[in-house]
Image (cartoon, rainbow, N blue to C red):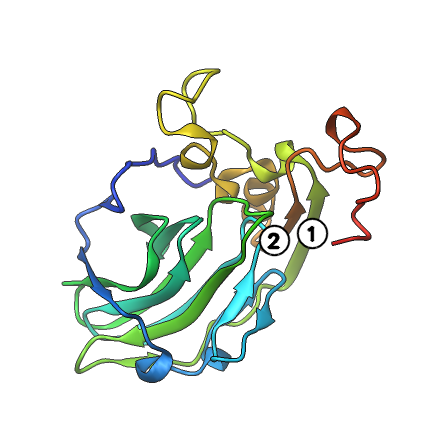
Amino acid sequence: MQKVHRLSRRSFVTATAVGSVTALVAASRASAAPLSDVHTVGRVREAADGFVEYSWPGISFEGRFRGTGVGVILDDANNDYDVQIDGTTVATLVTPGRTTRWINNLSSGDHTVRLVKRTESTWAAGRFGGFTAAPGGEILAKPSARTRQMEFIGDSHTVGYGNVSEQRDCSTNGGVNRNTNADISFGALTARSLDADYQINAFSGLGMVRNYNGGSPGSTYRTF
């Protein structure tokens, strides 16, 4: 079971000592490996400029690389992400914007990288442009999909709404988004215990039969 990592309100945090994190602005797909070299888990669609876009929580991208660093290409001013190297969370990116985030100073050799979307964004799409290796390194063939695939459909409980907050009212410690992590929701933990890929199709307040407080009566899961 993955350890819960508390969020920082900075744009990123270094969670362990395995490497350092730096940022470069004006992200571009030009230096990235093809997205066919990335194992994508969840519902995404291709954009015209080579990025993929998505809005469901828990979307994840996994790759392999050789070298001492890797860049994560993003275009998203709404969501939060965790970056994991070799299974350990090394950084949390809070609404990173259009940028390449670098994980550097790793031990030389082969590594895995996983980017996972912590938050939900019913109102906006996030965009991912791939992974790029640090100078002298290379992107390797993507990891294989896990033999088990699990899908979870639900509302805020399935999203993991506010699940890392230590108090009932999280308005004073960053708000709901800063305190939500879909990657440690009950669905993600269940899938991880079974070595399965997981897909979370869940929006807070959206029910299978009716929506919270009777809102949006014309919108159901068929809409999305």
**Which residue corresponds to the image point at 23% horizontal and 64% vertical from the top-left?**
102
Q: Is 211 or 110 nearer to us in this picture?
A: 211
- Expressed as whole percent of the image width and height from the top left, the position of residue 72 reads 33, 66
Q: Is residue 184 above or below residue 59?
A: above
- Expressed as whole percent of the image width and height from the top left, the position of residue 32 reads 35, 79
**Which residue corresponds to the image point at 65% horizontal and 59% vertical from the top-left?**
148
- Expressed as whole percent of the image width and height from the top left, the position of residue 66 reads 27, 76
Q: Which amino acid does the dot numbered 2 rest on?
A: Tyr
Asked whether the viewer can see residue 85, the reply is no
**Which residue corresponds to the image point at 43% horizontal and 81% vertical from the top-left?**
141
- Expressed as whole percent of the image width and height from the top left, the position of residue 85 reads 32, 58
Q: Is residue 95 above or below residue 176?
A: below
Q: Is residue 144 left or right of residue 150?
A: left
Neighbor class of circle 1 (other Cα within 10 Å; few <14, some 14-19, many 20+) is: some
Q: Is 76 or 134 nearer to us in this picture?
A: 76
Quarter holding the C terminus is: bottom right
Mark nearer the N terminus (1 vs 2): 1
Q: Secondary structure at mark 1?
A: strand
Which label belongs to residue 139? none
Give the mark count. 2
Which label belongs to residue 151? 1
Neighbor class of circle 2 (other Cα within 10 Å; few <14, some 14-19, many 20+) is: many
- Disc 1 and disc 2 in contact, CB within 8 angstroms: yes
Q: Residue furthest left?
A: 105
Q: Which residue is mark 2?
A: 198
